[in-house]
Amino acid sequence: MKTRGNLIVLSGFAGVGKGTVLRSLFETREGYAYSVSATTRSPRPGEVDGVHYFFVTKERFEEMIENDELLEHASYVGNYYGTPRDYVEKKLDEGFDVILEIEVQGALNIKKKVPDAILIYMLPPAAKVLYERLRHRGTETDEVIAKRMKRAAEEAQSVSKYDYIIVNRDADECAAQLDTLIRAQRQSVRSNLPFIEKLQEEFRELSEKE
Ligand code: 5GP
């Protein structure tokens, strides 16, 4: 009997290093599936359609909303972002823990729709570290960086609505923390109800034979 996987939502300020931490997690651990989002923003250099995002037009995105193809969606600094539903459902059914790397609005919508989802927020050790990382990344203009920092300050207000935080001092260490958190969840009673019920049934049958 395959236990359904957990839905894990990972958020964090732009530039906090979610990408690097997740890469480390996926390279070194089994049992995880990454949900590739759809977005209307343009690809950054090196980003591949279908790997980092499904890059779609505004019209296509609106069609996806209309057809209920998205588990959640939100707009972020002038673009739409959303989670395609089918992949997530399929992987959860196969027993994978599915990670959604999404911003706060989407995360809170997921929590409403799927109360069992686990919300994790990745924080930098200090705000200044974030600003410097964002500038050094060099993929955004100063104007976009300023907008993203403003959004980070707003998002900071919502961290208390999450279940867990992890602090990214070092990507591998942070990936290990994330893995530990999620593994602990795999042992929760709630995640193992089918197994527990099966065992209860077996005990019942055995005791009736006595
Ligand atoms: P970026 O443009 O830096 O790749 O992403 C901007 C923000 O959008 C990040 O906070 C990222 O986590 C979030 N994001 C990415 N995909 C999704 C999604 O499918 N839904 C929502 N709500 N946010 C997303």
Image (spheres, helix red, strand yellow):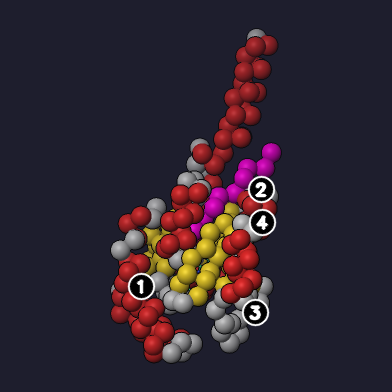
Q: Earlier in the sequence, mark 1 or mark 2?
A: 2
What x and y, as percent, mark residue 81?
Answer: 53, 69
Measure the C-alpha gap from mark 3 to mark 4. 21 Å
The kind of residue on which mark 1 rests is Ala
Quadrant in which the N terminus is drawn? top right
Measure the C-alpha gap from mark 4 to mark 1. 30 Å
The kind of residue on which mark 4 rests is Asp
Residue at the (36%, 73%) spot, across then down? 151
Q: Which mark is residue 10?
A: none
Q: Within 8 Å of ligand 1, the CB of disc 4?
A: no
Q: Within 8 Å of ligand 1, the CB of disc 2?
A: no
Marks 4/2 in contact by CB < 8 Å: the verdict is: no
Q: Earlier in the sequence, mark 3 or mark 2?
A: 3
Residue at the (58%, 54%) spot, across then down? 97
Q: Which mark is residue 93?
A: 2
What x and y, as percent, mark residue 30?
Answer: 62, 58
Q: Earlier in the sequence, mark 4 or mark 2?
A: 4
Q: Is residue 23 above or below residue 194?
A: below
Q: Main secondary structure of the magenta part?
A: loop
Circle 1 Cα neighbour tier, 10 Å, few/some/many (<14 / 14–19 / ≥20): many
Residue for badge 3: 48
Measure the C-alpha gap from mark 1 to mark 2. 34 Å
Q: How many marks?
A: 4
The kind of residue on which mark 3 rests is Val
The kind of residue on which mark 2 rests is Asp
| Magenta span contains residue 4 | yes
Asked whether residue 181 is in view, the answer is no
